[in-house]
Structures are given as C-alpha cells and as structure tokens.
Amino acid sequence: MGQLEYIYSSEKNFFAAEVKLPEIIADNEVLVKVSAVGICGSDLYHHKTYQGDQLRLGHEWIGSVVKKGSHVSHLEVGDMVTSSSTLGCGECSYCLRTEVNMCENPVHLCSEKLGALRNYLQISSFNAIKLNSKKPSDVLLEVMAVAEEAMALLEANKIHEPKKALVLGAGTVGILCAYLLQEKGIEVTITDVQTGRVKRSLDVGLKGYPLNFLMMDKSAHNQFDVIIDATSDRESSVSGWSLLPVFGTKNLVAIMVGKYINPIEIKPDQLSKLASRLVFMRGVPLNTLEATVKKWSGHLDFLASKLITHHFEAEKLNEGFEVAANAKVSGKVVITL
C-alpha cells in the first residue's frame, strides 16, 4: 500500500512524497487514514523559521482505523481516533503513568521525523484514543485538550477559589481556555492585540477587549487572580509574560500555555509582591486527552462553527498556511485529506 506525505522544504513550499507502507503492521500498531488536520501556532512557527528540507508538520488530527495489529483489543477497524502531539514509547515510567508529554523516548508530530499531514499514519495503539463520533468538528479535540490541561493545572495549583480570570491571547487555545473558565462559573475576560480575534471570542459568548483598551483602563489593572497566558513571543513584541504584573492581583496563579523561545527578563520583586505562582505547561498527557474525548467528542459543532474559518485540500497546503499565518483574516484553518 502506498501513501502520500506532505513535506515542507527550505524553498518554502510543500511537496507530496510517496511512502510505501509495510504490508504487515506490528501486533501493537494501528494504521489510520487521516481525514483532517488543524493548523496550529507551532506549525506556523516552524513553517516560518525552518531552514531544512524535510519538515513534517501537523499534530491536531483525526482519522479512521483501517488496519490493526493482532494484539490491539480496544480499537476496531472503522473507529475514529486521535492522539496527543507527542507519541509516547509506552514503556518508560512516564508513559506508564500516561504522561506521554514527558516520555523519555518520544516521537513528536510536527518534526522532521513525522507529521500528521499524510494520508496514512502508522502508530502504536497505546497512543491512539478512540473518539465517540465521526463528526468533522472533532478535529478541535487536541486543541481542546490543551485548554483542559490548563484547567487541570489551575485546579492543582490554585491557592483559593478563583474569582476573576484573564486570558491573554484570543487564538483558538485562548478562546477555549476562556470558554472552559466561564463554564466553571469564573468571571473571565479575554484580550488580544488583534481585534478580529477579539470579535471571534465575542461570537462564542465571551467578554473580550482589545489589549490597548485594557492597558488604558486602569480599573482593569491588578484585578485578576488567575491569568492564562496563551500568547508567545513568536509573532508579537507584546507577550503575555510582561503583562502579569500589570493585570495580576495578590495570590496570582498564572498558567503559561504559550511557548517562549527568547530570553525573558524577570523582575522577581514585581512577581513576589503578588505572591505569584507560575505554572508552565508541557504538552498534554494521555489521561487529559482521554477525558477531553469523553467530554467533548461529538459536541464541538458550535465551537467549530465559530472558530474554524477556512478549509483547504492537501493540494493547497501552501495557500492554507498563508491564510493561517494571517491572524487578521483567519481563525483555525483545517486541512482535509
């Protein structure tokens, strides 16, 4: 059986390469026909900065099992599945605790080795999580799992019951974090430098404001005991990290979801005055993904209708990534295979 995988090259273009799959898969593996892949901020970052010719992007994916190994008992051919962005070895001490995000011998989707932008994905059944529906909106499950993990980290690290929360960054992850906070009954505000993203947050029933408005509104300063930082320093000179002392109040718990790649100037006195607790997220463990699937699989139509703004066929990957990189016009962009 042959398949196509879509590889990104240093010439800043995607090309399709045929890869022959083995006729027989391992006893503990499944072969999955990938149906959809969401473009993530990490995809966009690597797409922009990569200098080689063998980058395989895509980690927010869903697909159907077309073949399974003889030892796979929890999945059947035809089942819809997904995985975490980190494929665990299934054998190390971390994987035995379902902490694939900490695996000692991982394979990362969105790397030179493997990406989900391909017709077929061959993975260990340990990493394959069965979905409850065949709805296309389930493509949001992996990013929803990121938001659910942020909620789990908040629950584990909160000093008291949160009263007011601020989400920095109104991309898909930020909006879903705010949505879950509101679901918990917490008063939540979301902000972004892009007014289009703020408008999208309003469309899902959130209270959102442009960042420059909150910066000028002194009554919003030092008011939030929870801050979810869903920004980064990849695209903007204004990153959420620098805003913690502006908006945080005493006993601040800050969940750092966004990824920072540049050195950060830390002013301990500013953060100590708030008695701040900073928690950095590292990926999504399987138990969080499983809980997310149980809760949300088949129930994401409303959010998908507001957050997914564009669909592209795999043959138009270059156009899809160009649109996804333009935060003024796009929300979540999905590639169909």
Image (cartoon, helix red, strand yellow):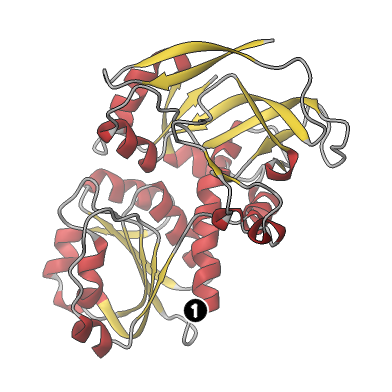
Q: Residues within 10 Å of mark 1 (few under 14, many from 20)?
A: some
Rendered location of residue 216, percent (x, y):
11, 68
Of the 4 image quadrants, the one containing the C terminus is top right
At label 1, the amino acid type is Asn
Rendered location of residue 76, percent (x, y):
84, 32
Q: Seen from this angle, which residue lies furthest left?
A: 216
- Which residue was labeled with disc 1? 157
Secondary element under disc 1, as helix, strand or loop, is: helix
Callout count: 1
Residue drawn at point x = 41 percent, y = 39 percent:
40
Please state if 210 lies on the left or on the right of 303 as rendered: left
Q: Is residue 302 depicted above or below 188 in this figure?
A: above
Q: Nearer the viewer, residue 1 or 186?
A: 1
Rendered location of residue 285, percent (x, y):
60, 56
The image quarter containing residue 112 is top left
Residue drawn at point x = 61 percent, y = 33 percent:
62
Residue drawn at point x = 74 percent, y = 39 percent:
125
Q: Is residue 327 visible?
A: yes
Q: Is residue 220 visible?
A: no
Rendered location of residue 284, percent (x, y):
55, 55
Please state if 262 lies on the left or on the right of 103 as rendered: left
Of the 4 image quadrants, the one containing the N terminus is top right
The image quarter containing residue 162 is bottom left
Q: Nearer the viewer, residue 304 or 139?
A: 139
